Image (cartoon, rainbow, N blue to C red):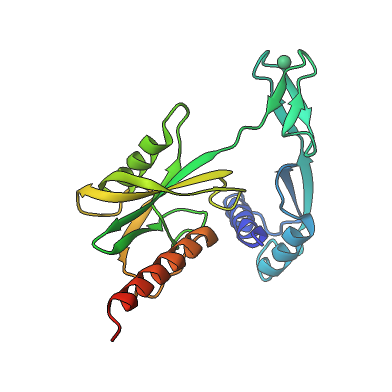
Amino acid sequence: MHELPVTEGILKIVLRHAEINGVRQVIAIHLQIGKLSDLEDEWIQHYFDYLSKGTMAQGAKLIIERTPIILQCNSCNTSYEADMATIGDAVCPACGFIHFEDPKVAVAAFIEDQGRTLLVRRAYNPQRGKWALPAGYVDYGEDPAAAVIREVKEETGLDIAIAGLLEVSGGTGQFGASIVITYTGTVLGGVAQPHDDADAVLWLTPTDALPEIAFDSTRNALAAWQKRHNRERSGEDPA
Ligand SMILES: [Zn+2]
């Protein structure tokens, strides 16, 4: 339900401009929202009515206009309108070029060092403040293995070597990427410190309680890792 923070933002802007311009009462607010947005008009009005109580915007009517989805052809630069149903493979009306939506690829690192694994706290949305594996997008033309080494360095300062491939997952679950490649890695050097998209780092042990994890796939991978380690340990030491 992200209409609430969006509506808070709208009200803040309205009140600021009303004050600057010496307005006593706001009657109506014209909003333009792109057709790709999943914000729902009724919810915006509902939250607005609630949030604006006691302000000079109380009772204001939101007039919401949906702006069209405009694509530009990669081949001939013609701009044309598309709809939600065909946006993944829209055809240019001028030259017939078909635009295919390519998957966005991300990489993540499951780093093990001295029996612990490394988590970073996300400094930005989505899932700001929650914990995740060091991760990021693969640049165009970049080897995913090189991308994960780069991302770990950027977010934690650590140099890692790739040990293997843990998982390749599809969908749109993790920060909007449609393919996430998770590598296992070992530390070559450096001391983990938060940088870039991370504002804290944590070395998790198999017996630690999980902090608040950003993504289901990470939570599952960590739980499996902890279970495996704890089982191995109890196998070694029957006491
Ligand atoms: Zn074209």
Residue at the (63%, 58%) spot, across then down? 11
Total labels: the figure holds: 0
Q: Nearer the viewer, residue 160 or 66?
A: 160
Which residue ends up furthest to the bottom in the rendered image?
239
Q: Is residue 140 left or right of residue 50?
A: left
Residue 64 rendering spot, x and y as whole percentages: 78, 48
Q: Nearer the viewer, residue 124 or 58?
A: 124
Quadrant into which the C terminus falls: bottom left
> In this orientation, does residue 71 appear?
yes
Residue 126 rendering spot, x and y as whole percentages: 52, 54
Residue at the (27%, 45%) spot, across then down? 160
Residue 100 rendering spot, x and y as whole percentages: 68, 28
Q: Is residue 95 above or below residue 196?
A: above
Quadrant into which the N terminus falls: bottom right
> In this orientation, does residue 58 appear?
no
Q: Nearer the viewer, residue 118 or 90?
A: 118
Residue at the (27%, 80%) spot, across then down? 237
Residue 153 rendering spot, x and y as whole percentages: 29, 44
- Please tell me in which quarter of the rendered image ligand 1 is found: top right
Find residue 87 and report its image quarter: top right
Q: Nearer the viewer, residue 238 or 222?
A: 238
Q: Is residue 170 above or below residue 144?
A: below
